[in-house]
Amino acid sequence: MNAPGRIERMLDEIMAVSPRSKWVLSALRAVPRHLFIPSIAQAFVGLEERESIIDRDADPDTWWEVVYSDSVLVTQLDDGATEIQLGARGSTSSNSAPSTVADLLQWLDPEPGHRVLEVGTGTGWTAALLSHVAGATNVTSIEIDRANAEQAAKNLVAAGVQPHLLVGDGAYGFPGHAPFDRVHVTCGIHTVPYAWIAQSRPGAVIVAPYCPGFGLNNALRLVVRPDGTAIGRFPGFASYMMMRSQRSTDIGDFDPDQAQLSTTRIDPRTLAYAPAGADLAISTLTGLQSRTYREADFYRMWVIGDSDRWAAATWEPKRDVYEVFQIGDRDVWQEAVDAYYRWVSWGEPDRDRFGMTVTPEGQYIWLDTPERVIG
C-alpha cells in the first residue's frame, strides 16, 4: 500500500474515535507522518497501548503499518541517555497519537495567516501541520532538547516545510515574534507560564495538555482577554510528557522503620478509577499526585505530596480494610479521600464543568463559573 492509501486508513481509524473538521483531515493528508518517524521507535498501539519496537530496516512492513495507525511512537528515553528498547520507561519525546494531535489542532483552530507559537517541536510533525494551515513563515516552534531540534529540522526540510525553529525553553515564549494568535503546547504542564498570555493578542487561543499528576490528565483551552488574563475550560483528554521545568519529584529513599501503618475502609480503586472530574478536583484541592500498579489480585495506589511525604494504599481480595503505608508527617491518603468525597458532594461534576483563569498573579481553577473558585 502506498503512503496516500495508508494515510486514508489512518484517518478512517481516528474518525472512528470522533468526527474531525475537514481542514484537520486536509492537514493530515498533506503532511505524511512517516517523514517524521525515526527508523526505530517504541510504539504503543491502540486503546490497549500494545507495546512493540518498530524497526524500518528489520521489518519495514510492520514499521509502515504502525506509523500509519493511531499509535504513540516514543522517539527518546531519559533525555537521550537510554536507547530505545522494549519495556523501557522514562519517555521524554514522542510523535503523539494522530487522534490526540487532531484533537489539539481542532481545539486550537488556527486560520491562514495566524501567528502561531508552538512549545515543543519534538519530531516536527505538528510544526509542519501548523505550517500547512497558518503558513510556515507564521509558525515559531521552540524545542528545549538540541538533539531533538536538530532532527526535527532535518525532518522538516525533507517535508519541504520551513517554519521558524528555535532551541530554548518554551516556557518563556519568544517575544521577538509576538503577538501570537495561537499557542500550541505539546508538553504537559501543571502551571501555565504567564509569558504565553503576555505574548498573545486579545482573542488568542492557547491549547495545552494540563497534567497536574493525579489520575487522568486534561486538555486545556484558554482564550486571552484584553485585560491581560486568560480564561477557558477542559474540553477533553490530553496526556503528554511533562515540560522539563515542571517535571514531578520522584519518591525519595526512605527508612521503613519510620513508616506509619494504618488501615482504610476505602478501596484504593475508588480513587484510582474515579472519572476525570474527580482527578481534577483532587489535584486542585490538595496539590497531590498519584501513581498506580496493578496485578490480577493486587492493586496499589501511591498518593504523593513530595519526595518525603507520601502514602501507598493497597487493595487485595477478600479484605474488609486495606493497608496504608505512610512516609512523612502529612496524611496525604486522608487528604485525597476527603477531596474525593467533596467532589461527590458537588454532584460528581465531570471535567467539562471545570475551568481555569490565568492572571499575572497566578492561576485559579473553578467549577461552573469563574466566581466559584475551588483552588
Image (cartoon, grey):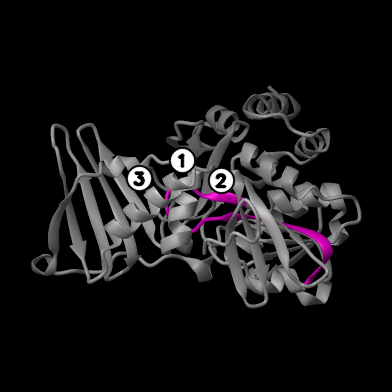
Q: Position of residue 149 (x, y in %)?
A: 64, 63
Q: Mark 2: which amino acid?
A: Arg
> Which residue is at a point 38% across and 48% down the rendered structure image?
341
Name the residue carrying label 1.
275
Q: Is residue 218 magenta?
A: yes
* Predominant SS along the magenta part: strand
User: Which residue occupies the extreme left position in the image?
Assistant: 257
Name the residue carrying label 2.
351
Q: Is residue 206 magenta?
A: yes
Which is more toward the observer, 22 or 305?
305
Q: Secondary structure at mark 1?
A: loop
Q: Is residue 105 above or below residue 184?
A: above
Q: Residues within 10 Å of mark 2 (few under 14, many from 20)?
A: many
Name the residue carrying label 3.
271
Q: Secondary structure at mark 2?
A: helix
Q: Mark 3: which amino acid?
A: Leu
Q: Is residue 12 above or below residue 275?
A: above
Q: Position of residue 260 (x, y in %)?
A: 14, 63
Cβ atoms at labels 2 and 1 below 8 Å apart = yes
